[in-house]
Amino acid sequence: MTSRRVLKVAEAVREVVSMAILTELRDPRVRDVTVTYVEVSSDLRQAKIHVSVMGDSTRQQLSLRGLQHAAGFLQQKVAQRVDTRYTPRLKFILDQGVKHSIEVSQILSQLLPRESPVSDEESFEPTDDGSNAAAPDPKDDLD
């Protein structure tokens, strides 16, 4: 079980690294990068930073190499912001979660039939027994 302190350090590292990538990193290889989450070891000496990169696999690998190249700079930013005895050593890992969720969504949209949109005239309201019935037309009450 991770301690509360480790979780707080992980969140602080995520904030610092994501803001530094967004505003201060000048490497042209590092574009369209999102820090998804950070894992910090229990002794606070290692930090695995999971990043999502938009683009094809060559673009992702190029951005990952750029991040590894800038790890010292980013580690310096973390040291300035997070007050711990040891500054965590940063390791960047490509997060495939977003890619997998898009693939699953595409597969599901192919397998599941599309539902037809319900028009205003065919709106349904639940009845007392839990089933759906057509809503009464308010024009009928005007007689």
Image: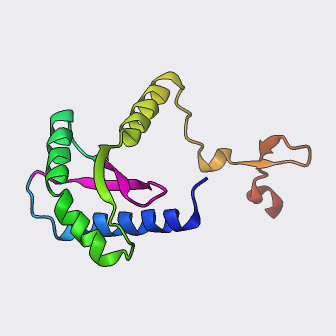
Q: How is the image coloured?
A: rainbow
Q: Residue 65's x, y, as percent? A: 15, 45
Residue at the far top: name it: 111
Q: Verify whether residue 44 appears in magenta.
A: yes
Note whether 77 is above or below 141 in the view shown: below
Q: Verify whether residue 45 appears in magenta.
A: yes
User: Residue 104 is drawn in which quadrant?
Assistant: top left
Q: Residue 103's x, y, as percent? A: 39, 31
Note whether 97 is above or below 20 in the view shown: above
Does residue 97 appear left or right of residue 61 in this picture?
right
Return the residue nearer the eye: 36 or 66.
Answer: 66
Q: Quadrant of the C terminus?
A: bottom right
Q: Residue 127's x, y, as percent? A: 86, 48
Q: Residue 22's x, y, as percent? A: 22, 65
**Residue at 25% across, 45% down:** 54
Q: Which residues are magenta?
A: 29-51
**Residue at 51% across, 63% down:** 7
Magenta residues: mostly which secondary structure? Answer: strand
* Residue 97 visible in this rendered orientation of the protein: yes
**Residue at 38% across, 53% down:** 36
